[in-house]
Amino acid sequence: MTGILAGKSPSGSKGEEPPLSVHHLDQLLLVCSVVLLVAVAAVRISSRSGLPSLLVYLGIGVLMGQDGIGNIHFDNAELTQVIGYAALVVILAEGGLGTKWKEIRPVLPAASTLALAGVAVSVGVTAAGAHYLVGLGWRQALIIGAVVSSTDAAAVFSVLRRIPLPARVTGTLEAESGFNDAPVVILVVAFSTAGRVEHWYVLVGEILLELAIGAAVGLAVGWLGAWGLRHVALPASGLYPIAVMAIAVTAYAVGALAHGSGFLAVYLASMLLGNARLPHWPATRGFAEGLGWIAQIGMFVLLGLLVTPHELGDDIWPALVIGLALTMVARPLSVVLSLAPFRVPWPEQALMSWAGLRGAVPIILATIPMVNGVDASHRIFNIVFVLVVVYTLVQGPTLPWLARALRLGDGTEAADLGIESAPLERLRGHLLSVEVPEGSRMHGVEVNELRLPAGAAVTLVVREGKSFVPLPTTVLRHGDELLVVATDPVRDAAERRLRAVGRGGKLAGWLGTNETNPR
């Protein structure tokens, strides 16, 4: 059983693990189900304490490892890297599906600059600190600098979406975490290959070319996928979430095969899909979120298994020193220099400097030099592991406090409507299911005050478990669920109008909250 969990090939030879059998499968399923249940329960604890859940998952892996109660010996860095890449694809897809284009569009130049120029500044400063303060060789220092310069998408998405921050801050940080994986992966691979990196401008050109290819592939696959899902009615609603995730993974695969950035491709494709108003969207969003949680749990537990705690003692102090250089010097300097042309207020720059969260991505990238056989690669992995754990423990729980101290909390935004669309293919129409949540300004609006476009009408209201056909003067309330029938030509206009009223109330069109400018 230990051999199976450790990724070893079972065989029937004497003295080795017996062949895989149904009994082994039962044990494996039991272990996996218990780990998932413990991880799910840990989310509740972490949400109350503000402690990032990734630390709990890493702890589960460490407890299952060779120094823990599970006594599982796992040292397959190559398998960890492959599974980590696959999990990161799912996490980026889930993050892209939840990213709102209206928040990303105004900050796209700033986020792109932070993901490129900011990474370069961070790599240089952190590598200098690792070389001069810790005494690492330049190759090892550059690898560590590149590895820890990528903000982790899973950590950023999970922490920031619980904090009511201004859209510009959240959008910049989320876009940065989705964009900066690509250049960092290229740098780590370049620094981990044999020989010196000749001609830095060639490396920069390669990074820009891979990003351009990945962006083109992601936009093309996302647009084609969204177009297809909006014009083809699938026979079952459960097929839509599967199709969306398959399209996102296709974007990664095509981008990687085209020698571009697959990570950027999957993020952009998912963002297009997430903003395309696809049918059965709440079901798709829930499915993707569930897959994202499974990917995070599996990835962090596996990384916890890979680490050997009794070997970390000598690397704790170097990790603290390098982390201090990264957190207090490299990250703030990269933010200030990257955002200087965009006139971002100082409080927002301060929060972005502190919100450069690290997570599983740096630990996964630290397996690249291990697979390539770089000298002192195990020490690099241990330093990165300690750095991520310590500084995530410090930064994650303090982010809400810092946001309040900088007066960046934004709790005035109206709650958005939950709208699900089901295509009526033979009738050439759509049935929109609209939920009016607490905080929506649709509360108190009469049905005729919705001013839906011709071809759309509210046909049914469900209130407190009872349904009725509304009159034009029926007043809508929090908790209502509306069924709106719209013909195909006005479907998008009807949804835009509903969302505008949800944000701005019945006077949305006159108060500047309209279909095209909800703020």
Image (cartoon, rainbow, N blue to C red):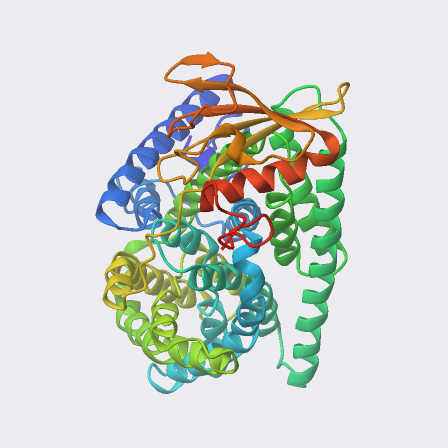
| Residue 432 drawn above or below residue 92 | above
- Taking the spot 43% from the left edge, 80% from the top edge, the residue there is 336
Question: Measured along the vertical axis of the image, is residue 395 above or below residue 518?
Answer: below
Horizontal side of 213 relative to 275 (left or right) equals right
Q: Position of residue 347 (x, y in %)?
A: 33, 73
In the displayed structure, 258 sits above or below 22; it is: below
Residue 371 appears in the rendering: no
Which one is nearer the viewer's eye here, 10 or 278? Answer: 278
Residue at image point 42% right, 79% down: 126
Residue at the spot 34% in from the left edge and 78% down from the top edge: 325
Q: Is residue 12 left or right of residue 157?
A: right
Residue 356: x %, y % from top left = 40, 66
Q: At x 51% / y 72%, what residue is drawn? A: 114
Q: For the N terminus, give its image quadrant.
A: top left
Q: Is residue 306 visible?
A: yes
The location of residue 342, given as percent across then percent down, is 51, 78
- Residue 502, horizontal then vertical, whole percent: 47, 40
